[in-house]
Amino acid sequence: MKKKLALVLSCLMTICMVGCGETTAPAETTTEPQVEQTQTQETAPAETEAPAAEADGMDALIEAAKADGELIVYGSCEEEYLAAACENFEKTYGIKVQFQRLSTGEVQSKIEEENGNPSGDVWFGGTTDPYNVAAGEGLLEAYEAQNASHLLSDMYRDADGYWYGIYKGILGFMVNKDELARMGIEEPADWTDLLDEKYKGLVWLSNYNTAGTAKLVVNTMIQKYGHDEGIQYLVDLDKNIEVYTKSGSGPSKNVGTGECVVGIGFLHDGITQIVDNGYGNIGLIIPSSGTSFEVGATAIFKGCAHPNAAKLWIEYALSPECVELAAQNGSYQFLVLDNAKQPEVAAEFGLDPENVMKYDFADAKENTTKYVEEVMTALGSAADDRFKTE
C-alpha cells in the first residue's frame, strides 16, 4: 500500500513540475552547483556537523563572511591553541585565515599605531585589560553576538559588545619545588611573602608594558591594597625580581627547568608545563589572602578589512567548537560558556574558578594605562634595562 501511495505522489509531483514549467528551473540551477561544491570541498565533514553559528540560522552572515574570503587574526593566547582555532575556522567555513601570535601589549601598541586602519581583523585571547584600553580609544568595533547568550554571566562581556570572554584564568604563583628544597626556602604562601629578601633574584614576572598578565597584576595590587600602597608593593617586589618577560606565560615556561624559581602568572600555564611537558617539580599556589583572575577575550578591530568574516569569527569563538580546542592543545583555562565542556584537568589540580576576589573591571578599563605609567615612574630608571619590549 505504501509503495502505491508513493507512486501516486511521485506522479503528482511530476505533473506539478511540468505545469510550473520555467518557474522551477532557476531553483534547480541555483541548488545543484552548491551541492556539488560542498561535496568536493575538503571541509565537507566539518560542515556536516553544523557549526553553532550555522545551526542557529546565521546563513546570511556565513555567506557574507565567505564573500570576504579571508580573515587575519592576532592571537594572544598560546600559539598551539591559536593555530588550532584558526585552522578549524578555515576548515569549517572555507575562509582563508592568517594568524600571528603577539602579546596583548604588542597587539594594543600595534593597533594604536595603525590608528583606525588595522592590518588585522580580530583579536583572540589574552586578558581584557588591554582590550578595555583599546575600546576606550575607539579601536574596537562593537558587535552584538548571537552566541553571547551562552555566556555564564554578563561579567564575561563588554556591556557595549566591544569584547566577549571565552575563558577565565586564575592568577597565582608557580614554583620549582626542587630548587626551593635545595636552597632550604619554603614556598611563598601569599603576595607579601614575595617581598622577603630570601626570594631576591628568584622571582619572574611579565613586563608591564607588553603583557596583559602584568597589567592585571598592577590592577590587582591597587585594588587589593589601595592606590599608593599597591604601587609601593610593586616597587618593593621589583627588588626581588630577576626577569620581566615579554609574554605573560614567559615565567611559567622557565619554572620547570629551574631557571625561574618563583613565577607569577596564570596557573593554567603551570598546568600546561606539568601535564604536557612533564615538569612534575612545579607547584601551583593560590595566594592565601586572595587573588584575581583574567577573562580571556576576543574582539573585532574597528575599520578592519574583512568585517563579515570578523563577525563570524566572534560567533565561532563563542561556541564549543572553538573553546573546547583549548584543552586539546595544552590550554587549561576555565571556559565561560554554558554549553562548553570544562577542562577536567584544571579541577584535578584543585583550582576553583570562583575562588577569586571581586575584580573592578570598570576601574581597570578607565585607569590601566595611567596605573602602568605610575608604576614605571615609581620604579625609575634603575629598572629600565629589564623592561625590554623586543
Image: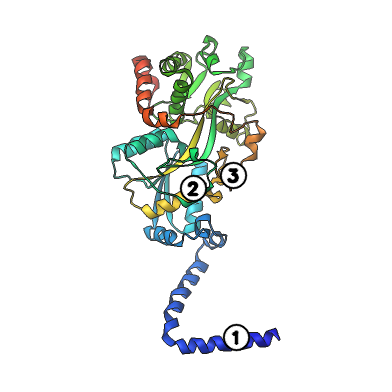
**Can residue 338 be spotted in the picture?**
yes
Badge 3: residue crowd in 10 Å (few <14, some 14–19, many ≥20): few
Is tag 2's residue or tag 1's residue first in the polypeptide sequence? 1
**The C terminus sits in image quarter:** top left
- Mark sitting on residue 242: none
Please identify the quadrant where the N terminus is shown.
Answer: bottom right
- The residue wearing badge 2 is 148
Q: Is residue 259 visible?
A: no
Q: Does 32 appear above or below 346?
A: below
What residue type is disc 2 on? Ala
- Residue 178's x, y, as percent? 63, 20
State how far apart marks 1 and 3 are (Cα). 50 Å
Question: Where 257 falls versus 43 (above or below)?
Answer: above
Instruction: Name the residue rendered at 36%, 52% in the picture.
Output: 307
The local secondary structure at tag 2 comes to: helix
Depth order, front residue of 31/2: 2
**As rendered, which of 263 and 223 lies closer to the eye?**
223
What numbered label is drawn on residue 328? 3
- Count of number-bearing discs: 3
Task: State whether residue 261 is above or below residue 342.
Answer: above
Alpha-carbon span between mark 2 and mark 1: 45 Å
Per the image, the residue denoted by label 1 is 9
Q: Amino acid at mark 1?
A: Leu
The residue located at (44%, 59%) in the rendering is 62
Residue 240 coordinates in the image, percent (x, y): 48, 14
**Horizontal and vertical percent position of residue 299:** 41, 44
Name the mark nearer the viewer: 2 or 3: 2
Q: Residues within 10 Å of mark 1 (few under 14, many from 20)?
A: few
Q: Relative to 197, does residue 149 appear above or below in the rendering?
A: below
Q: Residues within 10 Å of mark 2 (few under 14, many from 20)?
A: many
